[in-house]
Image (cartoon, rainbow, N blue to C red):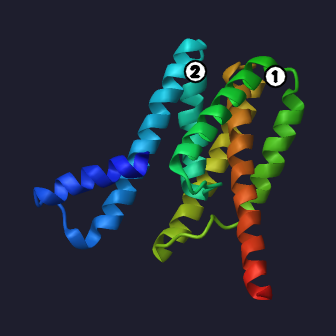
Amino acid sequence: MFRIIAEEIVLFMLRHKWLNQAKREIYEYAIEVMLLNGGLLVINLMLSIVFNQIPFFLAFLIIFAPIRKYLGGLHLRNSGLCMVCSVIFYVLVMLANRIIFFKYRLIELMIVIFLSLICLVLKPLPEKVVERKRHNKQIANGIIIADLLVICMGWKMDLHLVSAFALLDISALLFFLFAKIGVWLEIEDRQKG
């Protein structure tokens, strides 16, 4: 769905000679990603309004999105399926946050610290642009450390939003670890075959 819309937009821009034909695939991919991410943001915002969880949406933007951007994570080949899974994930974590709120805070904190330490050691997922690899790792480590500090300070002050921060942080770090394991298994398969 998003790919077709992106292709139509690029075709329109090419007909008007606003874009270079040689970079058509790059433009299509970029527009598809922008449509998907923009759509997800709008849907997540609407769900947050319906469930009266605007602070959770802000936590999502502050905690989950930066880690996901700079460390990487799971990717689905079909953008429509990605959209559906992303919305389901968002709703499940948002609802879990309402249920878990401070009931398991020590466990949440231990999981956040454990996953953060693992992710601080691991490299981000493979990037096509070599210069960005080191830069992304530095930014990702800074984000992980900042998240840890915010979560620890928030728990000390008994802030409700910290539970959302912790759940989103755990989710982002787990997505990264699952994707990293997938990369390792893929490399192992290539070496065997």
What residue do we see at 68% from left, 36% from top? 168
Q: Indicate whether 185 appears above or below 159.
A: below
Q: Indicate whether 101 appears above or below 60.
A: above
Res 110 quadrant in image: top right
Q: Which residue is mark 2?
A: 55
Element under disc 1: helix
Measuring from the top left, give residue 113's x and y in whole percent: 80, 46
Using residue 100 as the reference point, say whether residue 56 is left or right of it.
left
Q: Indicate whether 8 appears above or below 149.
A: below
Using residue 69 as the reference point, say whether residue 189 is left or right of it.
right
Q: Which residue is mark 1?
A: 100
Q: Indicate whether 60 appears above or below 75.
A: above
Measuring from the top left, give residue 68's x and y in whole percent: 59, 49
What residue do we see at 10% from left, 56% from top? 16
Quarter placement of the N terminus = top left
Measuring from the top left, give residue 49's x and y in whole percent: 52, 15
Please, what is the three-letter code of the amino acid marked with disc 2? Pro
